[in-house]
């Protein structure tokens, strides 16, 4: 018997089984009927606090089975269900059922994937996961990398590696104040907010980011990019990295990566690709052209918890030369006894990123890659794209909808009441008000969950399909819902 | 029926139940007999790779049940078991069984706790968890904060908030190069490696950290601290934060926090406490005195995955005034539609830290707090401390062991062969070699898992008990193991 201390924290074998089975049953039932529930109840904080119960830290304990049962009900009945087939907001995916079980197993064995000696098999599985992800997107198995919490951290991890590689060597000791040159970052104006956050947090300041305008197809304008670099060099600054986006958050556009790669070569800059959302689409042969240049990148970010359908959290940083990570993150405090393995090849993941202790988030990604294989993923990702194209086409055909953009698996569109189709300024303003109000209503209404994009000053509804449960039928129904609710909102706004 | 797409990623109801039950059974059995297994097999990377199987990304899929079954065996048979009663290395705890189930539930509902609208109930539970943690350590329920991946991130999150609060306002836009003053951080020389990592990554450079020597009791010498600040001010630098340590990694010492607080007041500096490991001990009435001053801190880091026994990952940043977090991390890109709740009080956690999308790591912490309550935690933490004291006392009594330090739940000691007790330099050097070799052997041997500390140039074995499964019997057996293996190692080294 394990528990000689007889603590109430231990859950004895039979009880663990009973509670575990009940939870498994509830999850199985939840997943089986998830399409019959509202996507969300749209409850506000006060209503939820009432349901949760406002209380101080309890003095005394509660039985484990009651806690689990209560939490299950609270969460299954009062959450936004991103596993719902009609969830297509932002870029959170329907989570894989195998990933749910993976998180249970990871927490049970609880390897600390910060050092090999602390997590022998888990470290090997994470290494294999990184290698497989590199193979998946087609950059080859020699890349190194690390699993992180998500897109911000995946991009941050690469940003800092880029700086170590390109900035004067002494900034690790002396800091940014030791160089009078401004270290500059270049990216498209559509790039995710992480770039600004990184520039601020890592001490460069938001003004060190050059937001390059986009061309007609919403890609970074590479001519303007090169002009900006030239000007900054002339002004005595030090450009150090360009961020290419592979699937921008709002509309899914992929920058001209090949073009960026050659600019990076010319000016000796670090080439990073933010592919957090879109880079898994590189697996689709028809899109090969669109992703040309990814092998030139020094680093890439991709998020398995987006288009590889992993439960949160799972992001990944890949680098062409893993030494850039250890150069940035490695340290050897005297209380670490980690590097003595007789075989001499142990990889300690704490030297690859910002964390020291690390959970085993790789497991859920590895399991899903095994469950589907390359071909299984190709099929689902292709279907997501086709459904998004269908969404766009149905909007094109509908006389009360305006289809705006379609790239990868993101479609943007808006509701346009009959007779409001001309482009007078007054109409445009009203259409923005109408669609914003419509989105707010849809987001709390529970029939469908979309998010927004602003494209050429147009407030759009945006559907991002990284959802293996969404089907043709859902898309057709969503079109109906948008039109029905749009009509109603228009009536409400115009009869006020 | 949910799955109209008929993807192989879906696991149908009955199959999910079958696989789930099997996994639950295996975990229940694993936990029930964890004390009978070796703590680790000490296998090296190559052996593990052979067992795992080196392969490229598979083209085709595998059945979910086979993947789970295979992964379970790989992990349960080839991991370091930090749930084992004789695991007391570094500061990873025995994970709570309820936390394992919590991670399953979190992954199943998969709330994205970045925004309230995306995770209504989960956000409320995380808010309550933060409040309860503040109550737990005794700083009061008005503190705000956020759950993060662990100690590094908890401390980083506070570090950046400190900088925003104390540095010139324009550094968010203009960066660190805009100020000629060096922004300086002060901490004890025993502080964890995160401080140096933060100084480097956030652009200050490692030289911006002032490592203050410790006094005889291994606490930061507050007189030297104040002298250092005065000198730096005179030299035209800008001190901005002091880090007090509440439970240092090597020996568990808690700095004189009250003294640091008053120095912070005098010089208008941010007071941060790194309590990642030790601050839960503030719950123990006998130790109240030791933690005096924690209410003066502007920010604190504590790790539920350390002394609150949560599975990885769970760290927490607490701040007296949550506005310091939003000032640092908030941003409002046009594609976020998050701040419109009618009740006007929705809290979006992406504005509180470095991540945007966030998993629901609060759930496992919240459940354990409910399961034990304040009194349950008090009992277990106190027992951990008493066991550590017993460990020390048994070493004191044993003629072949030298007890070195005992603070909170950390004991350091070393093996000293009979006749090696005098302090000649030659002996000291040999004792270091001997104990280092002994630790390496113990770490791979599987009988017990300790880590190391270096105290006054002595290489020590170090046991940190944040383990609700460790009992008196384990401590007694560990003493025997150390002596037996120490003797053998001594023989080996001296008969070479």
Image (cartoon, coloured by chain):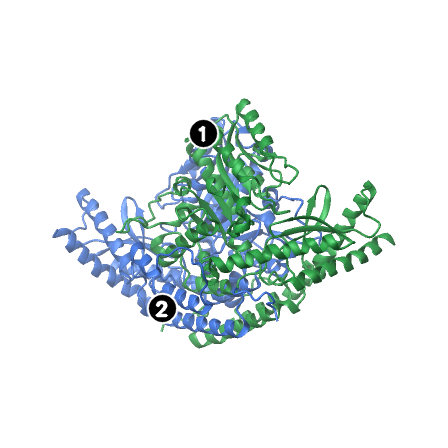
Chain colours: A blue, B green
Q: At 69% across and 54% down in the image, what residue appears? A: B393
Which residue is nearer to you in this view: A432 or A202? A202
Q: Can residue B371 be seen in this view?
A: yes
Q: Where is residue A314 in the image (x, y as percent from the top left)?
A: 49, 56
Label number found at residue B387: none
Query: Is residue B368 shown above or below A263?
Result: below
Q: What element carries label 1?
A: helix
Give the position of the N terminus of chain A as an image quadrant. bottom right
- Asked whether disc 1 touches disc 2, contact meaning CB atoms under 8 Å apart, the reply is no
Label number found at residue A34: 2
Q: Mark 2 lies on which chain?
A: A
Q: In this view, does B189 lie to the left or right of A83?
A: right
Mark 2, Cα crowd under 10 Å, few <14 / some 14-19 / many 20+, is many
C-alpha separation, residue under disc 1 versus residue under disc 2: 55 Å
Q: Mark 1 lies on which chain?
A: A
Which residue is nearer to you in this view: B281 or A315? B281
Q: Do labels 1 and 2 share a chain?
A: yes
Q: At 46% across and 28% down in the image, what residue appears? A: B178
Q: In which quarter of the image is residue A83?
A: bottom left
Mark 1, Cα crowd under 10 Å, few <14 / some 14-19 / many 20+, is few
The residue labelled by disc 1 is: A231
Q: What element carries label 2?
A: helix
Q: Can residue A338 be seen in this view?
A: no
Q: Position of residue A401 (x, y in %)?
A: 23, 56
Q: Of all residues shown, which one is farthest toward the right? A: B495
Q: In this view, does A254 lie to the left or right of A318?
A: left
| Number of marks | 2
Q: Position of residue A53 (x, y in %)?
A: 35, 59
Query: Is residue A32 shown above or below B404?
Result: below
Q: Of all residues shown, which one is farthest toward the left? A: A495
């Amino acid at each position: 018997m394990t528990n000689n201390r007889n603590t109430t924290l231990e859950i004895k074998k039979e009880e663990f089984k009973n509670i575990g089975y009940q939870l498994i049953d509830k999850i199985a039932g939840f997943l089986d009927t998830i399409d019959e529930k509202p996507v969300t109840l749209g409850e506000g904080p006060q209503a939820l606090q009432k349901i949760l119960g406002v209380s101080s830290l309890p003095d005394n304990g509660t039985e484990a089975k009651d806690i689990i049962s209560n939490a299950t009900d609270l969460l299954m009945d009062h959450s936004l269900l991103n596993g719902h087939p009609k969830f297509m907001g932002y870029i959170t995916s329907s989570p894989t059922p195998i990933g749910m079980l993976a998180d249970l197993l990871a927490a049970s064995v609880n390897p600390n994937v910060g050092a090999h000696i602390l997590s022998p098999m888990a470290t090997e599985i994470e290494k294999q996961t990184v290698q497989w992800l590199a193979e998946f997107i087609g950059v080859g198995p020699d890349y190194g990398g690390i699993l992180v919490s998500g897109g911000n951290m995946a991009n941050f991890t690469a940003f800092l590696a880029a700086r170590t590689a390109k900035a004067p060597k002494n900034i690790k000791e002396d800091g940014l104040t030791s160089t009078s040159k401004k270290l500059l970052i270049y990216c498209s104006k559509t790039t995710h907010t992480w770039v600004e956050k990184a520039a601020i947090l890592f001490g460069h300041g938001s003004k060190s980011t050059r937001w390059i305008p986009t061309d007609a197809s919403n890609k970074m304008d590479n001519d303007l990019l090169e002009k900006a670099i030239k000007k900054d060099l002339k002004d005595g600054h030090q450009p150090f990295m360009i961020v290419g986006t592979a699937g921008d958050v709002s509309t899914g556009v992929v920058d001209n990566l090949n073009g960026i790669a050659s600019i990076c070569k010319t000016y000796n800059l670090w080439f990073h690709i933010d592919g957090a959302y879109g880079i898994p689409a590189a697996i689709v042969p028809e899109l090969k052209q669109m992703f040309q240049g990814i092998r030139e990148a020094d680093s890439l970010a991709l998020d398995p918890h987006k288009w590889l359908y992993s439960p949160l959290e799972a992001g990944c940083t890949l680098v062409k030369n893993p030494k850039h990570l250890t150069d940035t993150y490695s340290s050897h405090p005297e209380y670490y006894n980690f590097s003595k393995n007789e075989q001499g090849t142990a990889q300690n993941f704490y030297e690859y990123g910002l964390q020291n202790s690390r959970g085993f988030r790789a497991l859920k990604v590895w399991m899903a890659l095994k469950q589907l294989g390359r071909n299984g993923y190709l099929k689902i990702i292709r279907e997501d794209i086709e459904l998004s194209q269908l969404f766009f086409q149905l909007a094109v055909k509908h006389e009360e909808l305006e289809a705006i953009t379609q790239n990868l698996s993101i479609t943007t569109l808006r509701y346009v009441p009959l007779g409001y189709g001309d482009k007078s300024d007054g109409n445009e303003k009203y259409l923005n008000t109408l669609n914003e109000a419509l989105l707010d209503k849809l987001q709390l209404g529970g029939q469908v969950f979309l998010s927004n994009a602003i494209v050429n000053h147009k407030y759009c509804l945006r559907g991002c399909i990284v959802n293996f449960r969404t089907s043709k039928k859902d898309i057709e129904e969503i079109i109906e819902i948008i039109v029905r609710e749009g009509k109603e909102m228009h009536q409400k706004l115009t009869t006020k």
